[in-house]
Amino acid sequence: MSEPTTTDVLAEDDLTLAQEALAASGGPEAGPPPGRAKAFWPSFTRMIGILTRFKVELVVCVAAAVAGVVAAVAAPKILGRATNVIFEGVISASMTAGTTKEQAVAALRAQGQDDLASMISAMDLVPGAGIDFPRLGRILVLVTLLYLGSAVLTWLQGYLLNRVTVRALYSLRQDVEDKIHRLPLSYFDRMQRGEMLSRVTNDIDNVTNTLQQSMSTALTSIMTIVGVLAMMFSISWKLALVALGMIPLMGVVTGVVGTRSQRAFTHQWARTGKLNVRVEESFSGHSLVRTYGRTQAVRQAFAEQNEDLYRSSLRAQFLSGIMMPVMLVIGNLSYVAIAVVGGLMVASGSMRLGDVQAFIQYSQQFSQPLGELGGMVTAVQSGTASAERVFELLDAEEESPQEAATTDVDPDGPGVIEMRHVRFSYSPGTELITDLSLHVEPGHTVAIVGPTGAGKTTLVNLLMRFYEVDGGVVLLDGRDIATMSRHDVRARTGMVLQDPWLFGGTIRENIRYGRPGASDEEVEAAARACFVDHIVRALPEGYETVLEEDAANISAGERQLLTIARAFVADPSVLILDEATSSVDTRTELLVQQAMNALRQGRTSFVIAHRLSTVRDADTILVMEHGDIVEQGDHETLLAAGGAYARLHASQFAGETG
């Protein structure tokens, strides 16, 4: 189970401010997957490099592929010998026994049959001998063994390459998962959730398909082309030139159709990314859609974007699909030309029939891998573009390293918080917090209030080291938190968010999430302390009740009480409550307030509040405006001062009388 995302940690006002500031400063481009990589060769080389972690398997794979191609390429030429044995045996059976081939050729020329004489002169035969069946049998056995061996080696090559690919992509997914947990919160502020999901799912799947299918085909196709070309030139350089004459035509087709196909895939990826964002927004805001009666509008918008994606995908697949048939047509034209020229050469005696047969087979073997390579162009480009997007994620700047972090941290410290002249900005040149100083005694409750965008949640995020300060220091029990590991800082801190976040699993597992080593008794004690035990026991499965997606099988108030119990189990010395009662009804709010009061006992607590009625009893109330603390004191003192807090109070309670 992963930690809550940025939108779960940041309050709405500070999240908007952070996104605007970070968007202005640049960063990862949030957009749909492209159809073409920005830097094809570096990204392609790096994508192939994913496989090089398994060098031994790759060497065996390449060796198997080479041996399989050699066997497949050698078989047609040897099979041509079988054709020669049969054809020349039939011809020799029709000739007079006891004469020599030279005598038969001379007799034919004397009769004016020069073409037949030339053809027989090129044959290896003995007049009257007939078909040499023992030799024919040996040739056929050898050819059968070659084809069987080629099939086994091709299977072995495919098996090994798929095994390497699966293991490599397993490692890539693990690298991406590890990377996500090392990225700073600011990265997720400027990256749309749908865009992130597209990179870690669609793009990695696309890379997987490219490596599993295209790379295997490319390996055998390239080696087959090289081997076939060598055999073709060894048989007849003239016929080889005829076969190669079709390559420029294939290049033209690839250039015309391939370019259009590539543009079509670019549009397809763009519309896929937009549709992903649309679906994510619709699902995340489903209740709002229903509340404001926008269901039909959402359906219409989805239908339009889905139609755009359908048309783009149809065009892309059509253009990609015609590549192979066109290549096969060109290959068949090459086959016809070779058959005509080869027939003339056999008739002239410059070539044997078996060699022509072998050459025709080679021409088919030659055109097929060319067509496959042509058809792979768009797939490889798309896969490389996806790999580039994954690599951008892997290369993103991480949180500052922790080499200097101390390890002698007292987990049971009292929880004294101090901030000295802290400065912070989401983007250079636009400071949000200019000079903030604060001291909080252990066990005190500090409420943070202020208008939208004042920096309330930003202050809390600095305490949690979700962001690093630009200047000044933040101290926890007298120790600069910059010298502590983030894990140690956050292990001392519990958090209850405005939107309760629960994970898939049982209620017991969700409460224990705050401290995995907590016993069942401690979990249930925390639930009792937070007034949720009787609610859980009323469920059919009690603490073993499995929460559905988004914990939809329990109410919002029950979800919030469970998050409070989770923080209680963690037993932190510092507690952060982010308007934890804003999403519950009035009756449940009282229960949640009681649970939070129990949770705050003996802990240094920060309460981010929008409703001032919830912070009357705080030891200290901080009023923030534009990133600075403009007032601080208790409720009565601040009201009497008639300043910013009094104005906020008046605006919220202006309608009350008496």
Image: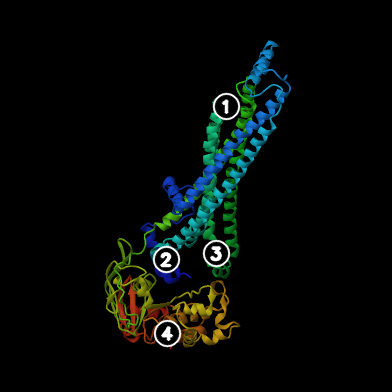
Tally of numbered discs = 4
Q: Nearer the viewer, mark 4 or mark 1?
A: 1
Q: Position of residue 638 (x, y in %)?
A: 32, 83
- Which residue, given by chain and number where applicable, does mark 4 sit on? 599
Q: Amino acid at mark 1?
A: Leu
Q: What is the C-alpha distance between the residues marked 3 and 1?
A: 63 Å
**29 up-or-down from 231: above or below:** below
Q: Position of residue 338 (x, y in %)?
A: 61, 28
Which label was assigned to residue 181? 2
Earlier sequence position, callout 4 versus callout 1: 1
Q: Nearer the viewer, mark 2 or mark 3?
A: 2
Earlier sequence position, callout 3 versus callout 1: 1
The residue depicted at 47 percent of the width and 59 percent of the height is: 171
**115 up-or-down from 440: above or below:** above
| Nearer to us in this view, 397 or 553 | 397
Q: Are marks 4 and 1 in contact (CB under 8 Å)?
A: no
Q: Amino acid at mark 4?
A: Leu
Q: Is residue 512 left or right of residue 303?
A: left
| Nearer to us in this view, 633 or 606 | 606
Earlier sequence position, callout 2 versus callout 4: 2
Q: Are marks 2 and 4 in contact (CB under 8 Å)?
A: no
Q: What is the C-alpha distance between the residues marked 2 and 3?
A: 26 Å
Q: Nearer the viewer, mark 4 or mark 3?
A: 4
Colouring of the image: rainbow
Q: Are marks 4 and 3 in contact (CB under 8 Å)?
A: no
Q: Position of residue 144 (x, y in %)?
A: 64, 40
